[in-house]
Amino acid sequence: KINNSYLLGQSNAPTTGGDMLKTREDGTPVWEGVDGTDYIFVKWYGGRGVWAGGYSSSTRNVIDYITISYTGNATDFGDLTVTRQNLAGCSDGSRGVFGGGNDGAGSGLNTIDYITISTTGNATDFGDLTFTANILSSCANGTRGLFGGGHDGSAYRNDIQYITVQTTGNATDFGDMTTTRSHLAACSSATRGIFAGGKNPTVFNIIDYVTIATTGNASDFGDLTVSRQKVTGCSDQTRGIFSGGDEAATTIDYITTATTGNATDFGDLTSGGYYMSSCANGIRGVIGGGSFSTLDYVTIQTTGNASTFGDLTIGRAETAATSGD
């Protein structure tokens, strides 16, 4: 509950009256306070970062967690319902959801499972994606989670599908990206979902965007500084960053999520990396779990090179990451 009101999409959520969802001039949704003057951001991130699944000599079901504001090594959280790699993750700030991937033996998966980020333990079944999606990406706006792109075992896909994070069940078709591709990154603001990079099999610099609250096809946003695949994304309320990738392993780019345009150079990772994943707490982004075992971090609103954060419990690539409280 926020200011004696319930989050949009939950039972008892207000639709009219003094406690209701408002929109700032920049388009971000906030809850109006009881007195009509207090505004609190609807958050899709949080203080705990979580890394799930991946590959390191074998496919893994492990889930790790960190406290994003403090550097140090990760701690065991629990296990996924299915051992897998090349999955995608998102959250609404309290529940983390992991979708898709492959079992390491050549079979793609449509599995979605979830965790309560504040409470360690094993994941629980959520439902299924609309198809077996491998090497996809995911983002969320505090209520709805999107899964975009991927490969179904036979072909690259341009599908975007969505879930309501607090309501278990199968995913639903949202629309299409501008280009069919996998190995892409995603990030979001409270309003927009952003998809960047990827391959099919050509490597792309494309950035697409959608309005998360309304279904429909993506529109062109701009371009990354370098065409690349196996890239990862995270964001705060206004800025998205895209890190690493096969063709630009140390590169970090940034965009302003509310304004379309090409990405700008942010700085460099401490080590070249691809098949990484990343998450944020609204101030700091943490990147890793890829071709190098360490985690890096940056301050999202301050450009510059990354610093070393710590290590996952098992150094591994092809993970998914998200954050919450």
Image (cartoon, grey):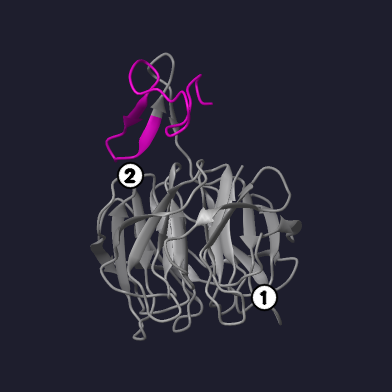
- Work out whether residue 285 can be spotted: no
Query: Which numbered marker is on residue 59?
Result: 1
Residue at (62% x, 70% y) in the render: 84
141 horizontally vs 258: left or right: right
Residue density around tag 2, few if under 14, some if 14–19, many if 20 or more, within 10 Å: some
Compared with 207, 30 (above or below) is above
Q: Earlier in the sequence, mark 2 or mark 1?
A: 1
Magenta-colored span: 1-30
Q: Position of residue 247 (x, y in %)?
A: 44, 84
- 212 vs 219: above or below: above
Q: Of helix, strand and loop, which one carries label 2? A: loop
Q: Position of residue 149 (x, y in %)?
A: 38, 68
* Secondary structure type for disc 1: loop
* Residue pointed to by mark 2: 213
* Residue 160 % position (x, y): 35, 61
Looking at numbered disc 2 in the image, what kind of residue is underneath it?
Ala
Which SS type dominates the magenta stretch? Answer: loop
Vertical position of residue 307 compared to residue 213: above or below? below
Residue at 64 percent of width and 46 percent of height: 117
Is residue 75 shown left or right of residue 218? right
* Mark 2 to mark 1 CA distance (whole Å): 34 Å
The residue under label 1 is which amino acid type? Answer: Thr
| Depth order, front residue of 216/90 | 216
